Image: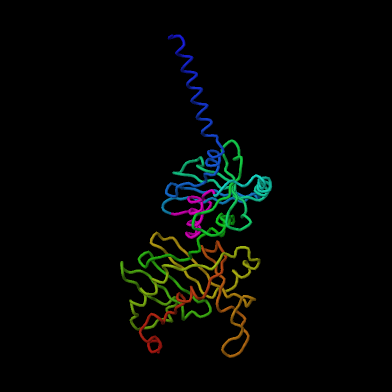
Amino acid sequence: MKKYIPYLIIILALGGAAIWFYLHNTPESINKREGSFAVPEKDITKVVMEDEKGAHVEITKGNGLWMVNSKYVAREELVKQVLEAVSRVTSLAPVPKNGHDNVIREITTKYIKVSVFENNSDKPTKSYWVGGPTVDGRGTYMLLDMGSKAASRPHITYVPGIQGYLTPRFEMDAEVWRSRVVFNYQPEEIQSLKVEYPADEKKSFFIHQVALDSFAVDPVVEANRIHVDYEQKYVKQYLNFYSSIYMEAFDNSNAAKDSISKTTPYCIFTITEKDSSVNQVKMFYMPFNKRSKALYDEKGFQMTYDVDRYYATVHNGEDFTVVQYYVFGKLLRQYKDFFFKPTEAAQ
């Protein structure tokens, strides 16, 4: 009898394997496995997106920040949207057989390949192709990458509680992903600040920190000094404005950016931080254009410049952008504004 035991063990093992294979390869189990797209948000450290045109966007978490292509800080709202998509995406059902070929044809012609990584791993936890929307616009076609091959069926996916398809959340323009923050400082982080008006030097001023909670204000040109004590509370209030200043949009593709950047700026902001790094922003008048809202000034003359928007070079001239007066207006103070009754003081 003992000589038959090895054969019985082999038979039992093969039988168990057959049962396991059957249970894990029923249509229901295959659909469940091939419709599993979500990755827990708490463990996600990188999301890589590539499309059929060769565009590549990579957002990576490190030191408390999400970065775009390892170079720029990412926009918080877009990171939130994509993390919500990859962590909560759910399969509604496999694509019906009568629509399978059309969806596969579309998803292999125009797609975004998404790879989600956990815990700084070099190997993605999940990879899948994201296609377009379903006919009703509520679902999104997705096809899971099973490693050595694609899944046998694409799935219709959605995020519970969210209306609309998911493809727009996987933005493929790296510039759109970049943070719009221009200034994000607390007063104590600013070693010095210079605000210059090249066309009117009397308005220009220089603020520098003299103690942990104390700042001095001087004119950029000594001849313009006002010989009255300035108000420290006005200085601190002004510096607090630099905690949350955003641009409207990047405009690096503007064909006129080089010529505009060579003109005399309307205003120049130069911030020196505690570590001596410098952040300079230059504002330029934006010529009147079809988007301009104000057509005439208070005297009835036609406007030559947009009063709501300006061009600006940020990141020390690296980027050309559009900024709004609504946002930047509070920074456009003058030297005299830091004094009590500045008109009388100037006299």
Horizontal and vertical percent position of residue 22: 53, 31
The foreground one among 105 and 251 is 105
Horizontal and vertical percent position of residue 149: 60, 37
Taking the magenta stretch, the answer to whether it contains residue 72 is: yes
Identify the image's colour scheme: rainbow, by chain, secondary structure or one colour.
rainbow
The foreground one among 134 and 228 is 134
Would residue 73 be seen by someone viewing this image from the given angle? no
**First to last magenta residue range:** 65-91
The residue drawn where x is 55% and y is 36% is 26
Q: Specify the quadrant that holds the C terminus.
A: bottom left
Q: Is residue 303 left or right of residue 47?
A: right
Would residue 252 be seen by someone viewing this image from the given angle? yes
Above-or-below relation of 50 to 178: above
Horizontal and vertical percent position of residue 140: 58, 53
The residue drawn where x is 43% and y is 9% is 2
Picture mark count? 0
Horizontal and vertical percent position of residue 81: 50, 57
Above-or-below relation of 8 to 217: above
Q: Specify the quadrant that holds the N terminus.
A: top left
Taking the magenta stretch, the answer to whether it contains residue 334 is: no
Above-or-below relation of 300 to 88: below
The residue drawn where x is 61% and y is 70% is 260
The foreground one among 255 and 74 is 74
The foreground one among 32 and 305 is 32
